Every structure is written in C-alpha cells, then in structure tokens.
Amino acid sequence: MARCLMFEKNIPKALWAEAVNTAAYLQNKLPTKALAHKTPFGAWFGFKPSLAHLRTFGCLCYAQVPAAKRSKLDERSQAGILVGYSLIKKGYRVLHPSTNKVLNVLVTTSEEIITGQIESDAEGPEMDYDDVPVRGTRSLAKVYERAQVAIKNKTWELVEKPSNRKVIGVKWVYRAKLNADGSPNKLKARLVVKGFSQRYGVDYIETFAPVARLDTIRLLVALAAQMNWKIHQFDVKSAFLNGYLEQEIYVNQPQGFQVTGKEDMVYKLNKALYGLKQAPRAWYIRIDGYLISLGFNRSISEPTLYVQRKGLQTQLIVSLYIDDLLVTRGDEATLADFKTKMKQMFEMSDLGLMTYFLGIEVSQTQKGICLS
C-alpha cells in the first residue's frame, strides 16, 4: 500500500516513512478476515473508527498558521502536501515545500481532486522531519496522564532560556507492558530527555545506580517459600520523576504542551526525567534515603535489599528493582503501615501478590511458590 501511495502522487522516496505510517494507519481501519471482518482499531479500542477525517494522500491542502506566528496582515494558511495523520493533536502531517519540513498542523481545506504531483528530485536536499510518532487515542491519553504527573510532582518550572547553558531536547516514547501470556497489560507513555547530548562534568557527574540481581530475587522467593511467607509487589509511578538533581538542567517544552505565548521559554528541571544519565542514580538515592528513614537497614553486599527489624525479629524484607518493590515477611498490619507510609511519599500502585516479575510467572499458594 505504501508503494502505491507514493507512486500515485510521485512522492519522493525520502518520504517513505510517512507513506508507511499512513498505510499502517489506514489498514488499522480496514476490516480483516483474521478478526472476523472487524477492523484492528475496533478490536483494540472497542468502538468503530471514524473515517470522516480521511483525505487523499499527497493532495494539496492548506495548513493553518498559528496566530502567534503571524500578524494580522499575514496569510492565515499556507499551501502544503498532506502526507499523513497526527494523533498527538487534532490535525494532519503536512509537508511544506518551501521549507522541506513535515509538521503536525490543522488543515483548513484540501483539494483532493487535484492530482498535484510532487516533483521528485533524488539529488535534492534531505527532508527535515518533525520527530513525532503516530499514536492512537489511548497513547494520547497516556501522554496527558504523564504530563499531569510531572506537573503535580513539580518536576519543572518554566523559565527564560539561559544564554550560557545548553537546552536539551525531549520526546515522547511509548511502549506496552505485557502480561505473562503476552497480552497487553497497560500502555505507557514517557517524556524522555535526549540524554545523549548531555556533557560530562557540566550536565552530570555520577550515573551509577544499583539494580537487584536475579540471584537476590531467587533468594527472596526461596526464603518466602521456605518460611511460608507471601511476596507482595508495588510499583512506583514515574519513579525517576522523584529524584532530585544536583546540576542545572534545562529542556525544551514537550511537543503538544507548549504554553501559549511562551513558546520560546524552556523548563528548568527540579527533579529528574527519564533519559537523563543521572536519573536512575537520583531515584535510587531518594528511595534509599526514605527506606532508611523508615527504619530499614541496607544490605552491605546487596544495596537493593532492605531489612526492617524490631529487636531480633525481622519485620519486613524489601527488594528494590528500579521502580518495583517486592515486600515479604510482614503481617497484614505491618504491611498496611508500610504501604501507607510509602504512598504518603510516592504515588504507587499496589499490585497485590506477586504474579509476574522479570518475565517469570509466579503462583503463590498454601503449598508454596511456583515459578514458570
């Protein structure tokens, strides 16, 4: 389909990715025998897709120019070539021939009856793309959810762009968390800093953060099975956003969340974001300090294993794997108290008894713990 779309309008090969994305977008809205003549979109989201917004690939269109970028006497729209659909905001992917850039914009009108083929020039300049993936409505909801978490957590503050500091770019990254059987558990959207542009000694120094070894997890499971303890699992939401930064870091405003009238301003980070080289370490220092303040002792040989004792009796054992906490040994009252104190400091999800961890399916019964 992508090849046909390009041949029909003589689209340059440099735009092959736009054609592939558009083909996938359209095929997801077409019935298929594999799904009993349902559309992939309908099977996933549970409702029929709207087709009212579909336009001819490669047609001439007129993209709205934002009010902030034009005066009263300037044109309100510019001619462009429609090369796809955008779901990060209401609009389309439009190629501006004058700048060779593909942007996500609102389209006021389109002239689909005009064949208006683009002159293909294999030796011409390389196209400059706006790096925004095409996503579904559920991913869009996750984007807003993550943005609200960052705002609620006071992760950043809007400031004037500094003249003596480098501003780092950001992008949205999406992935699906799967169950043990491979079925989707939940969708995740993360605002990620382009950490590859950070400079050592300026933007970061220390980056190391310990992670629980698989041997430690096995030891915890074996101990729980031997002592007939239950292992509970907790997940800290947007864990890295809780880590404090020692360096001054400035990032661009996330696409789709620019503050109107302040598009040239940037965010100064108060806390870490995913993608920063020091983000894992900042989170570990934060959670480590809090667990110690709750009376836990950190293991000398395994810095992600914590034990809370009352006299000679072990109260709780906690193993930390990035943003996942495995907790065992405690009675219901002790566990409830620990859960309350953790939720007072961090936004967490109580996943109940551990059933799936690091690709291992876990079954906990009165007879013991079974791994598969």
Image (tube, rainbow, N blue to C red):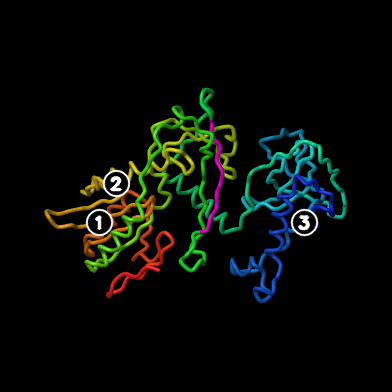
Highlighted range, magenta: 167-176
Contact (Cβ within 8 Å) of mark 3 with mark 2: no
Classify mark 2: residues with Cα within 10 Å, few (<14), some (14-19) or many (20+).
Answer: some
Q: Is residue 249 left or right of residue 131?
A: left
Task: For the N terminus, give its image quadrant.
Answer: bottom right
Mark 2 or mark 1: name the one nearer the start of the chain. Answer: 2
User: Which sits in the foreground, 337 or 202?
Assistant: 202
- Report the disc number at residue 325: none
In the rendered image, residue 63, in percent from the top left (x then y), is placed at: 75, 45
Which mark is nearer the camera, 3 or 2?
2
Q: Is residue 349 left or right of residue 224?
A: right
Q: Residue type at mark 2?
A: Pro
Which residue occupies 22% across, 49% down?
A: 296
**What residue occupies the far front of the structure in this picture?**
215
Which residue occupies 52% across, 58% down?
A: 176
Alpha carbon distance from label 3 to label 2: 57 Å
Task: Name above or below for residue 165 compared with residue 361.
Answer: above
Mark 3 or mark 2: name the one nearer the start of the chain. Answer: 3
- For label 3, the residue is 55
Classify mark 1: residues with Cα within 10 Å, few (<14), some (14-19) or many (20+).
Answer: some
Alpha carbon distance from label 1 to label 3: 58 Å
